[in-house]
Amino acid sequence: MARIVFDLDGTLIDSVADIAAAANATLAEVGEAPLSVDQARSFVGAGAVVFVERMARARDLPDPAPLVPRFLHHYEGAVTQTLIYPGVEAALARLEQRGHSLGLCTNKPHLPTQAVLAHLGWADLFDTVLTGDSLPQRKPDPAPLLAAFDALGTGPSIYVGDSDVDAETAARAHVPFVLFTPGYRTTPVEDLPHTAAFDDWSEIPNVIVSLGV
Ligand SMILES: O=C(O)COP(=O)(O)O
Ligand SMILES: [Mg+2]
């Protein structure tokens, strides 16, 4: 049986509306105009600090540092607009029934990750959870992904994610990468290295079988 690790934002959940709301609450506090949801989506993937750096650049703010704690404060409980992609829960239940172990490796910080997992009733769904601040390194550094696989014991490894950062992380960790194409990637599918791709969660159990694990 395999160790299957999943990314969170843009892979299991569509959370950009909550992230944009936290960003826009932050910008409002410093008298700046809001981001569009599309703009916010294009800034997600490399963690909260990089998100704030991109947001500050978009508003010509020279120093992102003071915005980081403000953004994290608004982000902590930002769960109400987040949606689970259709078919995710049935697919994860199926994989678990087949005996695979399931982990989470996200660049989302610990507090909003815990908040959204609790909100969705997923607090006990994953056998291990690595967040953007669990280790000194975050994706695309392979360390958190490798730590997630280690925590799941032994067996073949598969990483499922949506973004350019995820593709690079998997390549650097030397593990097969399964790409969820409707997520938050900013690069065409054909330009992202991947082992397999899918656009509907009902396909994932068969995709995993096709990888021979
Ligand atoms: O917080 C981010 O930037 C991205 O989170 P993810 O790694 O779950 O896609
Ligand atoms: Mg993602």
Image: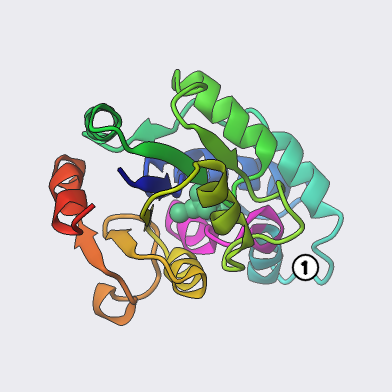
Ligand 2, by image quadrant, is bottom left
| In the image, farthest residue toward the bottom | 191
Seen in the picture, residue 132 relative to 13 is either above or below; the reply is below
**Residue 44, percent from left and from top:** 53, 57
Q: What element carries label 1?
A: loop
| Color encoding of the figure | rainbow
Task: Write the start and end of the magenta stretch as one range.
Answer: 37-51
Find disc 1 in the rendering and name its residue. 61
Screen quadrant of the N terminus? top left
User: In terms of image quadrants, where is residue 174?
Assistant: bottom left
* Label 1 within 8 A of ligand 1 by Cβ: no
Look at 59% across and 62% down and name the residue there: 139
| In the image, farthest residue toward the front | 154
Asked if residue 147 lies in the magenta stretch, the reply is no
Position of 88 with respect to 166 (left or right) is left
Position of 207 with respect to 79 (left or right) is left
**Residue 96, percent from left and from top:** 30, 30
Q: Can residue 178 be seen in this view?
A: yes
Q: What residue type is labelled 1?
A: Leu
**Residue 125, percent from left and from top:** 44, 26
Look at 34% across and 33% down and name the residue there: 84
Seen in the picture, residue 126 relative to 198 is either above or below; the reply is above
Asked if residue 49 lies in the magenta stretch, the reply is yes
User: In terms of image quadrants, where is residue 192?
Assistant: bottom left
Question: What is the crowding at mark 1: few (fewer than 14 residues within 10 Å), some, or many (at least 20)?
Answer: few
Q: Can residue 79 be seen in this view?
A: no
